[in-house]
Every structure is written in structure tokens, then in C-alpha cells.
Image (cartoon, helix red, strand yellow):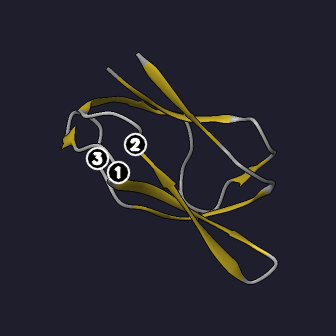
Amino acid sequence: MEELKASMAGSVWKILADKGQSVDDGQEIIILESMKMEIPIVAEKAGTLKELKVSEGDFVNEGDVLAVIE
């Protein structure tokens, strides 16, 4: 199980994968927006997106868990 965490504080701009979807190593899952920059959150291993803990528009802090890959 891998937890995808926010690398910095910002807003969830776009979610690129759906719960239950198979994802590849290095695939972008979520894009955060902070200070007008887009920050991609990528899967660090292949698996299935088990859980999305955020929705588009949510504000997150650095270290918050955004999604879980199994």
C-alpha cells in the first residue's frame, strides 16, 4: 500500500484518475495548484487506486494523504 501525500500546501486543481482504476509507476494522479504553479502528484508504483481522500477544489497542507494505491 502506498499513500500519495501532498508535497506542499495548495488546492487540488485536477484529479486525473478514478477510484478502482489501474495506475502505472510514474502516472500523474492529482495536480495541485499553489502560487499559480501546477504540482503533479505521481504514483511511485503500479497498482490500483484504492481510495481518493480529496476532491477537486479542496485545500491541502504539506504531508496530507491525498490517495491510496494498493
Of the numbered discs 1 and 3, the one sitting upstream in the chain is 3
Q: Are marks 1 and 2 in contact (CB under 8 Å)?
A: yes
Where's residue 53, x and y in %? 54, 34
The secondary structure type at the circle numbered 3 is loop
Residue tagged 1: 26
Of the numbered discs 2 and 3, the one sitting upstream in the chain is 3
Residue at (54% x, 50% y) in the render: 55
The relative height of residue 56 versus residue 70 in the rendered view (above or below) is below
Where's residue 19, x and y in %? 29, 37
Alpha-carbon span between mark 1 and mark 2: 5 Å
Amino acid at the residue labelled 3: Asp
Label 3: few (<14), some (14–19) or many (≥20) C-alpha neighbours in 10 Å = some
Numbered badge on residue 44: none
The secondary structure type at the circle numbered 2 is loop
The relative height of residue 29 versus residue 21 in the rendered view (above or below) is below
Residue tagged 2: 43
Residue that extends furthest to the bottom in the rendered view of this protein: 36
Residue tagged 3: 18
Amino acid at the residue labelled 1: Gly
